[in-house]
Image (tube, coloured by chain):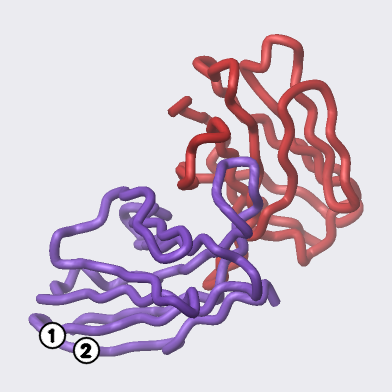
Amino acid sequence: LAKTTQPISMDSYEGQEVNITCSHNNIATNDYITWYQQFPSQGPRFIIQGYKTKVTNEVASLFIPADRKSSTLSLPRVSLSDTAVYYCLVGDLNDYKLSFGAGTTVTVRA
Amino acid sequence: DSGVTQTPKHLITATGQRVTLRCSPRSGDLSVYWYQQSLDQGLQFLIQYYNGEERAKGNILERFSAQQFPDLHSELNLSSLELGDSALYFCASSPTQGYQETQYFGPGTRLLVL
């Protein structure tokens, strides 16, 4: 499994855009990149998944450069309720399990 | 609400005891996954079942076992409990299996071993 590295924590203010970059230097050809969000004492929740270039949904955008050795999760106009831990995961389609790292704790302040 | 239910929400027991955690997947989902989240180990995959059969194993101790029943609900059995087993235990489900599928997590069972 490709190892991922992401910042331990990030602070932001309401209305700002938050960008979390995840490094995955040894990502394999068949690997996909997935992000989950977790609030305290709740189970993780899927945010977005991508393979290359850019993916956007109603919650976030995921930017993946051509070499795929990193990816950036972009949360537009965050609110206090976006305060959570964000996990970057990498795995191929034959991985049944999710391998979570330490994640990035994002704190949004008023 | 993910559609995955877990019972009980909280469990307090003593060392050496045995407990059973229960998970009902989302309607129609065939795969069930169990994860353990503790302060020092983070969120770790334990085991996965697909349509009643064990499909993948992670860092699951021999004192722990699981099964998935014909109605697709799953149980995680923890025996000879130790203080270090205190953690949040999450169940997740997905329609079939594979990394590309979203896993839907339940609210978790908080286990405290005294």
The C terminus of chain B - image quarter: bottom left
Tell which chain the image draws in purple. Answer: B
Residue A72, compared with residue B99, is above or below; it is: above
Amino acid type indicated by mark 2: Thr
Residue A63 figure quarter: top right
State whether residue A16 appears in this view. no
- Mark seen at residue B17: 1
Name the side, left or right, on which B113 lies relative to A34.
left
Label 2: which secondary element? strand
Alpha carbon separation for disc pair 1 and 2? 7 Å
Q: Is residue B43 left or right of residue A19?
A: left
Q: Amino acid at mark 1?
A: Gln
Q: Is residue B98 above or below residue B18?
A: above
Whether labels 1 and 2 belong to a single chain: the reply is yes
Residue B66 x %, y %: 30, 69
Relative to residue B28, is residue B24 depicted above or below? Answer: below
**Left or right of A93 in this view: B63:** left
Question: Alpha-carbon neighbours of circle 2 within 10 Å: few (<14), some, or many (≥20)?
Answer: some
Percent of width and height locating residue A110:
82, 63
The one of A16 and A35 positioned closer to us in this rendering: A35
**Residue visible at 82% across and 22% down?**
A53
Name the residue that disc number 2 marks: B13
Question: Is B111 situated left or right of A39 in this image?
Answer: left
Q: Chain of mark 1?
A: B
Q: Is residue B84 visible?
A: yes
The chain letter under disc 2 is B
Chain appearing in red on the rendered image:
A
